[in-house]
Amino acid sequence: MDKLIITAAVTGAEVTRAQQPNLSITPEEIAEDVYRCWQAGASIAHIHARMPDGTPTQAKGVYAEIKKCVEEKCNIIVQFSTGGAVWHKPEERIECLDANPEMATLSAGSCNFGDDVFFNSPSFMELLATRMKERGIKPEIEVFEPGMIDNALRLVKKGLLELPLHFDFVLGVPGAMSGNIEDLVFLVNKLPKGCTWTVAGVGRYELPLATHAIVMGGHVRVGFEDNIYYRKGELATSNAQLVERIAKIAREVDRPVATPDEAREILGIRR
Ligand code: KMH
Ligand code: ZN
């Protein structure tokens, strides 16, 4: 098995400071949060930018500032979200690629998302894939439903994405695929040989899915974007606390944790 890549999804677009008082908002706060996750064992930071009042933004200037602040502190892989918030327009969502992150997400289809719809048309997926290819940005394919794997493979056939791909299974979003262990096993078995995968379990699904992924040879995403609790009824004190728990479980089962450079090697990222 490869070493374990831990992704810290520090901010998301939906969580508010009223729900989680330790949420980072400004570029400086986000960079400090990411730095603490790196110290705890994270090798990728999945980031959604916020305005000073906490509103999610896809503005390239804010993303560029976050990247600069993070790079001053550590060599973690910076991954920006092209998913944004459900109400962001496609032209806003793609802007973060102008800040040239090493990685960015590419959601491979539309699905319900709570009471909303997370809209990803075929033409927008093609545009994202094309822009990432032009800029040498490694895509992470976000999968909320099984058919999204097939959508990504259609983009491979069109020459817009290249195998082996790296997938992130985001499971347990109300309105999309559930986060039971059999759901994860089904998705993993659908992947072409050589592809890598991470699982991001939402809410109560986070810990069981993460622990299974560690022993299955997958990778793990944790953080306030997916889950604000350490355990039922107890808010996490920081994103780093959630990362630290995963690193500890991995060490206990003899699955070493990857450094950012080891993660680059595993994912085929050339800086
Ligand atoms: N905030 C969700 C609507 C991504 O980061 O690429 C979409 C999302 C996916 O979080
Ligand atoms: Zn996200």
Image: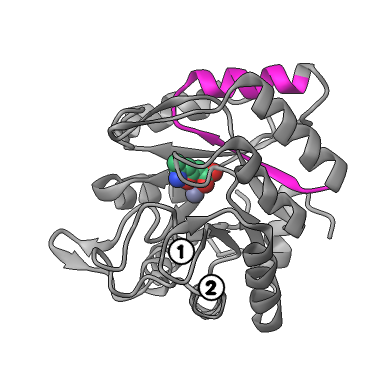
Q: Are marks 2 and 1 in contact (CB under 8 Å)?
A: yes
In the picture, residue 113 is in which quadrant? top left
Label 2 sits on a secondary structure element that is helix
Instruction: Tell me if 40 is positioned left or right of 129 in this view.
Output: left
Whether ligand 2 has any atom under 8 Å from the Cβ at mark 1 is answered as: no
* Mark 2 or 1, nearer chain start: 1
Q: Residue 12: where, in percent of width, then height? A: 44, 55
Residue 114 magenta-drawn?
A: no
Instruction: Tell me if 226 is positioned left or right of 204 in this view.
Output: right
Q: Provide the residue designation for mark 2.
A: 34
Nearest the camera: 111 or 172? 111
Q: Provide the residue designation for mark 1.
A: 10
Residue 199 appears anywhere in the view? no
The residue depicted at 75 percent of the width and 23 percent of the height is 156
Residue density around tag 1, few if under 14, some if 14–19, many if 20 or more, within 10 Å:
many
Residue density around tag 2, few if under 14, some if 14–19, many if 20 or more, within 10 Å:
many
Residue numbers of the magenta segment: 136-156
Quadrant showing the C terminus: bottom right
The amino acid pointed to by label 1 is: Val
User: Which color mode does the image show?
Assistant: one colour
Q: Residue 105: where, in percent of width, then height? A: 61, 44
Q: CA distance from mark 2 to mark 1?
A: 7 Å
Q: Residue 187: where, in percent of width, then height? A: 47, 26
Residue 153 magenta-drawn?
A: yes
The amino acid pointed to by label 2 is: Val
Nearest the camera: 83 or 155? 83
In the picture, residue 190 is in which quadrant? top right
Q: Is residue 74 above or below residue 246?
A: below
Nearest the camera: 253 or 59? 59
The residue depicted at 55 percent of the width and 27 percent of the height is 120
